Image (spheres, rainbow, N blue to C red):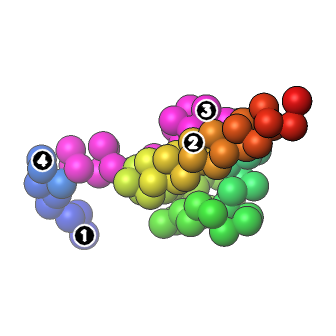
C-alpha cells in the first residue's frame, strides 16, 4: 500500500527531519559527540536503527542553544581562573 503524501508534508519532513551527520554539522560537533549526546539522554532520536538515526530539527536547535549557553558559562569561568 502506497501512502499519498501531500507536497506540504514532504516539505515539512525534508526541513524538520535530520540524520546524525546533519545534526553534527548544525551543532559543530563530530558524529561521535552526537552519539554521546544520545547516550547521555541530552538528545533523543525519533527513530534509531543500526545504520540511521533520525532527529527533529526543532529539538536539535534547542540543544544547540543549551550547548551555547553552557559553553559561554564555561568560558567565563575559565577566564576568571587565569
Disc 1 or 4, which lies upstream in sequence? 1
Spatial CA distance of label 2 from label 4 is: 34 Å
Spatial CA distance of label 1 from label 3 is: 40 Å
Whether tag 3 and tag 4 are in contact, CB under 8 A, the answer is no
Neighbours of disc 2 within 10 Å: few (<14), some (14-19), many (20+):
few
Residue 21 highlighted magenta (yes or no):
yes
Spatial CA distance of label 3 from label 4 is: 31 Å
Q: In the image, what residue occupies the spot 33% across and 50% down?
A: 16
Side (left or right) of 63 relative to 74: left
Q: Establish if 30 lies above or below 46.
A: above
Q: Disc 2 marks which residue?
A: 68
Q: Position of residue 81 (x, y in %)?
A: 87, 37
Disc 2 or 4, which lies upstream in sequence? 4
Disc 2 or 3, which lies upstream in sequence? 3
Side (left or right) of 15 relative to 8: right
Whether tag 2 and tag 4 are in contact, CB under 8 A, the answer is no
Q: In the drawing, what numbered circle is on residue 1?
A: 1
Q: In the image, what residue occupies the spot 56% across and 66% down?
A: 44
Q: Disc 4 marks which residue?
A: 7
Q: Position of residue 53 (x, y in %)?
A: 57, 55
Label 4 sits on a secondary structure element that is helix
Amino acid at each position: 500500500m502506497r501512502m499519498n503524501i501531500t507536497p506540504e508534508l514532504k516539505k515539512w519532513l525534508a526541513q524538520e527531519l535530520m540524520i546524525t551527520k546533519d545534526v553534527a554539522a548544525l551543532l559543530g560537533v563530530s558524529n561521535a559527540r552526537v552519539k554521546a549526546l544520545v547516550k547521555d539522554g541530552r538528545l533523543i532520536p525519533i527513530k534509531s536503527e543500526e545504520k540511521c538515526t533520525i532527529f527533529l530539527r526543532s529539538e536539535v536547535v534547542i540543544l544547540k542553544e543549551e550547548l551555547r549557553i553552557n559553553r559561554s558559562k564555561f568560558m567565563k569561568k575559565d577566564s576568571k581562573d587565569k
